[in-house]
Amino acid sequence: RFAANGRDSASFLQAWLPYLVSPNVFLLHYQDLKDDPALWLRELAQFLDVEVRADAWPAVLRRVSLAWMKAHADKFRYRVAGHAPLTTGIVRQGGVAGTRRSLVSD
């Protein structure tokens, strides 16, 4: 079970079920995006009705890569008004392994 705001994953997903058929909900699995970012970013742009010039796609795909995000980690640091940026950013390993600490053994 994965605890999300004190709820298990089944009840979390169940709460979303009524919205999944809505035309303004785009469901994207992280692994799909990771496996084929070009396909899914194009799908997302189309869903959002955002036109991306053909010559801009290489730059878009480069900037969503883990390598680019790690090289520019300062752009992804949490910032809170009136406070210094946190020393850790959100770009880590490019996976979801950190959530395993939220799993319980049953």
Image (cartoon, helix red, strand yellow):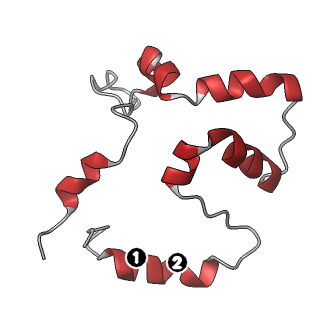
Identify which amino acid the numbered label 1 is placed on.
Answer: Phe
Tell me if 55 is positioned left or right of 16 in this view. Answer: right
From this viewpoint, which residue is outermost toward the left? 105
The secondary element bearing badge 2 is classed as: helix
From this viewpoint, which residue is outermost toward the front? 35
Number of numbered discs visible in the structure rendering: 2
Where's the C terminus, which quadrant?
Answer: bottom left
Q: Residue 87: percent from the left, percent from the top?
A: 27, 22
> Residue 16 has which mark?
2
Asked if the residue under mark 1 is in contact with the one under mark 2, i.e. CB atoms within 8 Å, the reply is yes
User: How far, Cα to Cα, is label 2 from label 1?
Assistant: 7 Å
Q: Residue 42: percent from the left, percent from the top?
A: 76, 44
Q: Residue 64: percent from the left, percent from the top?
A: 58, 30
Residue drawn 75% across the image and 51% down it:
43
Identify which amino acid the numbered label 2 is placed on.
Answer: Trp
Q: Vertical placement of 42 versus 69: above or below?
A: below
Q: Vertical placement of 80 versus 11: above or below?
A: above
Q: Vertical placement of 82 versus 22: above or below?
A: above
> Residue 81 has which mark?
none
Q: Vertical placement of 104 versus 21: above or below?
A: above
Residue drawn 40% across the image and 76% down it:
12
Residue drawn 84% across the image and 34% down it:
52
Tell me if 79 is positioned left or right of 32 in this view. Answer: left
Where's the N terminus, which quadrant?
Answer: bottom left
The secondary element bearing badge 1 is classed as: helix
To which residue does mark 1 refer?
A: 12
Crowdedness near tag 2: few (<14), some (14–19) or many (≥20) residues, C-alpha within 10 Å: few
Question: Could you say which is closer to the camera, residue 28 or residue 8?
Answer: 28
